[in-house]
Image (cartoon, rainbow, N blue to C red):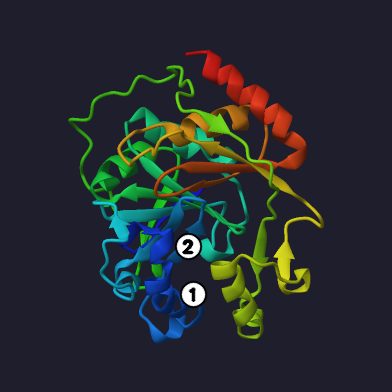
Amino acid sequence: MELHILEHSLKVASIEKEGIEICTHGLIKLAFLASKTRCKFFSLTETPEDYTIIVDEEGFKELPQSNLISVADSTWLALNVVSGGGNASSSQPIGVTKIAKSVIAPLADHNISVFMLSTYQTDFILVRERDLPMVMHTLSSEFTLFRVVNGETVAAHNLGISNGFVKPKLGMPRPIIHPLSSPSNMFCVTSLDPDTLPSVATLLMDVMFYSVGFPNNVLFTSASGELWKMVRIGGQPLGFDECGIVAQISEPLATADIPAYYISTFKFDHALVPEENIQSVIRALRTESTAQ
């Protein structure tokens, strides 16, 4: 398999609920008028606590300076696993559980913190820019590494750093140490056809800022009527420095062969699993939690 290192330098930020009004203009521009900006990577996730935005440095300039916006200290790079050749954008959905043992676990073993963003099409693994040499060293034996430079995919040259790393303790248990909860609401994982964006822009703005629904006929869906349940990880904000949180959740799910979308946010992590698997998920994660 191939691992693509995308060229975007990313910021991870939290917009407080009461700060959404001052950010609305910038967010609408980033989401609907991308051709009017130089932004190439943008994600917005709403949770009960806040809005988490992942955006490249050019896109970040569209947001106002405000004490209602908190920004993680580090600059992040996005990694994308591609099964077979081709561009990252044309890769098939693989799910976080399918990269749990090949990507997530090895990075956790080497004490590399990751920030996950699962989408309908693919999964992005965000790592700190300063950790890239270690990331490449860790994953080079499993993947063919490529970098995206000016929109072109080229071979990623080894950074020449192969000595001085502490040998990881492989095979060590990874018990779940953070509280888990599962809200009662259901989720639908969908993908919007870009060609329909102008016709549904107003409706989509309602969804983003006023939380109303919109018709199914403008969406691609993974399966008709398929619903997902959320498992939320964390009782207190998790921060960015702790390593292995994603691995604690994704490895047991991978062992149980349960697909999952995984979304990290500024304060908590979230895994979406098929509704019919929720009891199996709870059993698998409780087993890991009691193993500590």
Give the camera-side residue of 159 and 24. Answer: 24
Q: Is 229 left or right of 101, judged from the image as shown?
A: right
| Label 2 vs 1, first from the N-terminus | 1
Residue linked to disc 1: 31
- Contact? badges 2 and 1 (CB < 8 Å): yes
Q: Which residue is drawn at 61% across and 77% down?
A: 194
* Residue 110 at x, y percent in the picture: 33, 31
Q: Decide which of 133, 11 is in the foreground and name it.
A: 11
Element under disc 2: strand
Name the residue at 70% across, 55% down: 188
| Whether residue 59 can be seen here | yes
Above or below, 49 relative to 206: above
Look at the picture and state if 135 lies above or below 33: above
| Amino acid on which disc 1 is placed | Ala
Quickly name the residue at label 2: 44
- Which percent across, then down, holds residue 50? 44, 55
Disc number for residue 254: none
